[in-house]
Image (cartoon, rainbow, N blue to C red):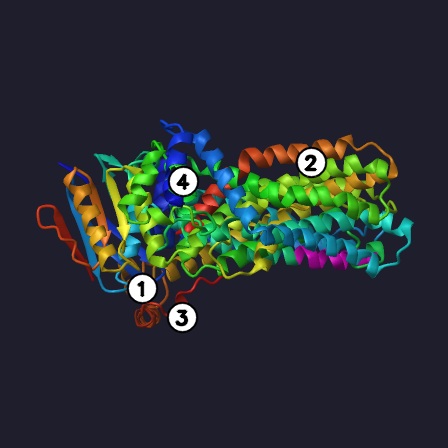
Amino acid sequence: MSELIAENLHLWRGEQHVLRGICFELARGQCLQIMGANGSGKTTLLRALCGLVPLEEGQVRWRGELVSGSPHGFHTQLGYLGHDNGLKPDLTALENLRFATQLRRRAAGAQIAAALERTGVADCAAQLLRRLSAGQRRRVALARILLTQVPLWVLDEPAANLDPRGQSLVTELLATHVTHGGMAIVATHQPLGLTAPQLVPMALQ
Amino acid sequence: MNAQQERVEMAAAEPQIEGSGLGRAVVGLARRDLRVALRRSGDTLQPLGFFVIVTTLFPLALQPEVSLLRDIAPAALWVGALLASLLALDLLFREDAQDGTLEQLALCGQPLASLVLAKTAVHWLLTGLPLVLVAPLAALALGVPAAALPAVLAALVLGSVTLSLIGAVGAGLTMGMRRNGSLLAMLVLPLVVPVLIFGAQATAHAISGEKVAAPLYLLAAMAVLAVTLAPFAVAAAVRIGLE
Amino acid sequence: MAWVWFHRFGSPPYFYRVARRLTPWFAWPALVLGLAGLVWGLAFTPPEAHQGYGFRIIYVHVPAAWLSLQVYIVMAVCAAVGLIWRMKVAHAVAASCATVGASFTVIALGTGMLWGKPMWGTYWAWDPRLTSELLLLFLYLGYIGLRSGFDDTARADRASAVLAIVGVVDVPIVKYSVDWWNSLHQGSSIIRAGGPAIATPMLIPLLIMILSFTCYFAAVLLVRARGEILRRERNAQWIAEELAAPDAGAGPGGGSGAVAATFRGATAPNSPAGHARI
């Protein structure tokens, strides 16, 4: 039973026809891996699915309903990690995560510590983000995604700036999420360690 | 050990928050913005310095004769306030757009209009309010009698609120563009001319001892209109800027 | 019934063809009424008591000023329609309005200044109408400036739509505040808001000129909107078909064939002509 359905998505960026008739379906326990050369529109597709960029044609349906009709409901079920970490460099990791949970309807408290522990940056919790390395910041961003406790993860190059241990962390997190009935859309070339039917590959030209 | 302690303290101090509705999100956003701004105090103090310098330029460009300065005081104060606000507005969304947090605000499921209203309110607290507090000094330096100051302050408070809100629309639209302050000025200044006219009029009336109720009421009406309608325009502008 | 018409107009090919047919219906009346109004106004109305013949510039000034405001409203309404109903034609029409409106504003300002010299002895006297026109010009320039800041036409459309809507809400407030500001600083009684009251024999040619300017605006808007749609949709299939075999009553086949060839050659992506330009 597909929860996320994309039908015939088209998008132009100025002159370029970036998304040409993208179609896919995603059910619980599946991870869509989007691959493609630089500039093929991976980031644009992810942002369009989230609703950040308007689509010229086509529709996205979440649990049968059009996303464009009720975007707020869709957004509460969705966690987005883009190229930027979505964190303020002038706050500590803890402060950032505390704010991220205040925005959404999720319980906070000791769970923040647990999330930081899981992503391996528990010792950086009280440091300003600008003092951390790029890899550490990315891990804090991953902790943010963990804390959202949403069914759908939309991740754009989640393992960017991460060392090999960090990359295996990403695959572990994805595997756990997907095995427990979550869904993910990931734009990355890195092997995710999942196989069909959990993994749905898609290549963009 | 520090992190360990921090964790223990935090688990003890913070009660389990069951769910956060819009109110909690707005308060959280306001506190976050205040915290960030206080750690980067340079950014928020610059527009203030600009205001002081601009109002100093007027006496330098004319004669330091008090009666003449008193005549131009409304103009100097309000033009200075306008330009300083414009300078500050550039900062409203730019940082958040660059580090990706603005996207997260658009995707969190809370109404974006409320969130940007909170952001603009904090921005006003940090840039508009200090300006209003410094203005009496500039006003006295321009020969404004002390008895006129309350009315001048009231007019500046009301006017700066409207300025911040309309300026926020411009800031949202020009968010992604090259750091070009003049486009923002060109978009916003014609729209805020009424604030300038009534604000300067209120100041002039206060200086000459006439009644200031009429222009103040009009400024208040514009502020109310801005607070109710502008957030939707700002949210639309921010969404377009995020594309 | 009205909705059907509304949505049909929203289709670029339909609008493109209908606009071509409608243009002469506005262009000719504009010319005829304009000539009639000018001749009547300039040659056949008696000279005004105070200003002699100089005031006749109002036959150009007043229609231009009136149109400059109407065009802004039309622009904002079309932009709002384009934003809410996501109608490309509406955005194209709004984009076409901007320069036309700005031109009307410049004409109003120029003729106002020419009128000012004999009337007030100076070219510029901060008359409320002229000051409002100046602010309206800044609003237009801001709109055009904002559009040119975006490379992507669709984004430029949406951003400038938000600006136009905010502007149109603000325009009455600006006009009111400028009038109020001016009324406080009444200098000599010659500088009366709006000038002297207009007697009936002078009113009719004025109305004719306003009508003429309106028809002119409609004609120019249709032509520019067609051009705007042509530019935006130049890669679309229907454009190639349209240019290869235009509807009856169009120009000679050879001419449109050459035009079609030119456009097909110019359909390379990211061509310089693609950047948003008014």
| C109 drawn magenta | yes
Return the residue nearer the eye: C37 or C88.
Answer: C88
What residue range appears in magenta? C107-118
Q: Amino acid at mark 4?
A: Glu
Q: Is residue A201 visible?
A: yes
Same chain, marks 2 and 4? yes
| Residues at circles 2 and 3 in contact by the CB criterion of under 8 Å | no
Quadrant position of residue C32: bottom right
Q: Mark 2 Cα within 10 Å, few/some/many (few <14, many 20+)?
A: many
In terms of secondary structure, where does tag 1 sit? helix
The mark that comes first in sequence, 1 or 3, is: 1
Q: CA distance from mark 2 to mark 4?
A: 48 Å
| C21 drawn magenta | no
Same chain, marks 2 and 3? no
Could you tell me residue A23's position as x and y percent?
18, 49
Q: CA distance from mark 4 to mark 3?
A: 58 Å
Q: Is residue C152 left or right of residue B186?
A: left
Seen in the picture, residue A77 relative to B93 is either above or below; the reply is: above
Label 4 chain ID: B
Same chain, marks 4 and 1? no
Q: Mark 4 Cα within 10 Å, few/some/many (few <14, many 20+)?
A: some
Which residue carries the number 3 mark?
C272
The numbered dot on residue B219 is: 2
Which residue carries the number 4 mark?
B6
Which residue sits at x=49%, y=34%?
A: B27
Q: CA distance from mark 1 to mark 3?
A: 22 Å
Q: Amino acid at mark 1?
A: Leu
Which callout, 2 or 3, points to the residue nearer the camera? Answer: 2
Label 2 chain ID: B
